[in-house]
Image (spheres, coloured by chain):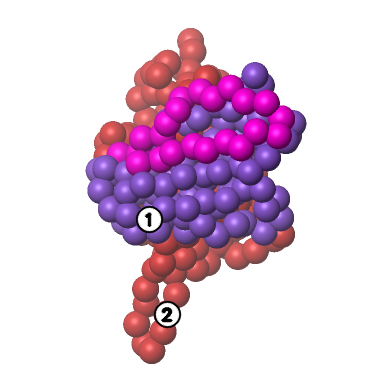
Chain colours: A red, B purple
């Protein structure tokens, strides 16, 4: 059974950088795309970005200038950095598996859409001085 | 960007009721649509994927339908455990998967 666990500081000062790590257990980080998703208190879900185990990334255009997602396959982990945070970045941050699965066939490699089927429990990050 | 619009935002219902939630995409997403259930303080849980496929372990009272731009989630007989917020999500766009704004199912 795949499990995801977020870790990182729960309090970040305004203008600083939010850093979180997601550790994947019960399965390999390879072949899948992995996402960060956040939810401000009392509000809906916002996709932040994803990374493939190869290191390729894609970010929500609204956050692209401030977001960096990286992967460490040796530790089965991927990480989020969000710079220049403000109170509007206060949210529960989730890591999740998806939204694509990579595969290779006949010498070529492809990816297919998948839903977010496994999620971490979420971690609340508060931006406050 | 593909926009997802759910309706209603809030739904009041009783145990045993048949409940339907609608999700509309701003452009065709084929059947790349998922439904999630979220309870307070918990991560979203996948219920339905590819518009109508039931995730393993999810009760059969949940069903999904639709394709293109119009989708529905139906709970055939609402149970006490089903009072929660439900989100649709499209995962067709290679850019990113976007969520609807959510539908809160409340006790009437």
| Separation of marks 2 and 1 at Cα, in angstroms | 28 Å
Q: Is residue A104 left or right of residue B28?
A: right
Nearer mark to the viewer, of 2 and 1: 1
In the image, taking residue A16 as reference, residue B108 lies left or right, namely: right
Chain containing mark 2: A
Tags 2 and 1 on a common chain? no
Residue at disc 2, secondary structure: strand
Q: Is residue A124 left or right of residue A64?
A: right
Q: Quadrant of residue B38?
A: top right
Q: Residue at x 37, y 73 (%)?
A: A110
- Please, which residue is most extreme toward the front here? B17
Q: Label 1: chain?
A: B
Give the residues in magenta. B3-24
Q: Given the current orientation, which residue lies at the most extreme bottom position? A: A106
Image x and y of residue A79, in percent: 49, 45
| Residue B63 in sight | yes
Q: Position of residue A53 (x, y in %)?
A: 46, 62
The residue that appears at 65% across and 19% down in the rendered structure is B108
Q: Which mark is residue B67?
A: 1
Q: Residue at x 30, y 39 (%)?
A: B3
| Residue indicated by mark 2 | A104
**Label 1: how many Cα within 10 Å (few below 14, some 14–19, many 20+):** some
Q: Secondary structure at mark 1?
A: strand
Q: Which mark is residue B97?
A: none
Q: Say whether residue B89 is magenta.
A: no
Q: In the picture shown, does residue B9 fall above or below A74?
A: above
- Of the pair A12 and B60, the residue shown nearer to us: B60
Left-right relation of A127 to B27: right
- Residue A124 visible? The answer is no
């Amino acid at each position: 059974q795949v499990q995801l666990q977020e870790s990182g500081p729960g309090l970040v000062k305004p203008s600083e950088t939010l850093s979180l790590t997601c550790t994947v257990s019960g399965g390999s980080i390879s072949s899948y795309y992995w996402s960060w998703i956040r939810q401000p208190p009392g509000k809906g879900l916002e996709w932040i970005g994803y990374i493939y185990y190869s290191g390729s990334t894609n970010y929500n255009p609204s956050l692209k200038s401030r977001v960096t997602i990286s992967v460490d396959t040796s530790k089965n982990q991927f990480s989020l950095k969000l710079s220049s945070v403000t109170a509007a970045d206060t949210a529960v941050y989730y890591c999740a598996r998806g939204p694509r699965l990579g595969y290779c066939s006949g010498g070529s490699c492809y990816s297919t859409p998948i839903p977010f089927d496994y999620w971490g429990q979420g971690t609340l990050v508060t931006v406050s001085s | 960007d593909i926009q997802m619009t759910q309706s209603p935002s809030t739904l009041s219902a009783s145990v045993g009721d048949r409940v339907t939630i609608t999700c509309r995409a701003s452009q065709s997403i084929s059947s790349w649509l998922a439904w999630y259930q979220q309870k307070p303080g918990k991560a979203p849980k996948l219920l339905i994927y590819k518009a109508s496929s039931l995730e393993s372990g999810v009760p059969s009272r949940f069903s999904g339908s639709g394709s293109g731009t119009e989708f529905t989630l139906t709970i055939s007989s609402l149970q006490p455990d089903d009072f929660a917020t439900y989100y649709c999500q499209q995962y067709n766009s290679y850019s990113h998967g976007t969520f609807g704004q959510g539908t809160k199912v409340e006790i009437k």
